[in-house]
Amino acid sequence: MPSMSKLEVKNLTFSYDNEVNVIDDISFKVDKGQFISIIGHNGSGKSTLAKLIVGLLDFNSGQIFFDNEELTKKNMNKLQTKTALVFQNPDNQFIGTTVEDDIAFGLE
């Protein structure tokens, strides 16, 4: 049973081609009020990890929990209301011309 973290990732593994793991057995948790940074070189899996956490990609194995509730295909829509993904490049923004505009739109 996971702890009472806001986000917990346990033994997450993902591969685009089912041969080489891009994400390989990653585990971490983020408690309420805690901030973390995920840093690494281009191509190291940062964006892939973010897409897995918000449910844009299906992982091969492992678990993701939000507020102690496991992310599954059944509850994905409900749990996605607790996450957001903001692109680094402003050209990829959804609605506004700035990250602030996109976050404000999501809150509406």
Image: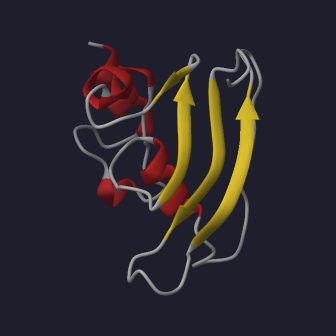
Q: In this view, does 65 lie above or below 81?
A: below
User: Residue 7: where, in percent of width, then height?
Assistant: 62, 29
Please give the name of the residue rendered at 41% of the width and 80% of the height, measured from the top-left corner.
18
Location of residue 28 (image quadrant): top right
User: Residue 91: where, in percent of width, then height?
Assistant: 32, 59
User: Residue 22: where, in percent of width, then height?
Assistant: 56, 75
Please give the name of the residue rendered at 67% of the width and 23% of the height, measured from the top-left corner.
1
In the displayed structure, does residue 28 sit left or right of residue 57? right
Please give the name of the residue rendered at 46% of the width and 74% of the height, measured from the top-left corner.
15
User: What colour scheme has been applied to the protein in the rendered image?
Assistant: secondary structure
In the displayed structure, does residue 95 sit left or right of residue 46? left
In the displayed structure, does residue 94 sit left or right of residue 70? left
Please give the name of the residue rendered at 66% of the width and 44% of the height, measured from the top-left corner.
10
In the displayed structure, does residue 81 sit left or right of residue 21? left
Q: Is residue 100 above or below residue 20?
A: above
**Numbered-mark total:** 0
Q: Image quadrant for the C terminus? A: top left
Residue situated in front as seen by the camera: 93 or 36: 36
Residue situated in front as seen by the camera: 83 or 101: 83
Residue at the left extreme, as displayed = 95
Residue at the front extreme, as displayed = 1
User: Residue 35: where, in percent of width, then height?
Assistant: 75, 30
Q: Is residue 61 above or below residue 69?
A: below
Residue at the bottom extreme, as displayed = 19
Location of residue 105 (image quadrant): top left
Q: Is residue 8 above or below residue 31?
A: below
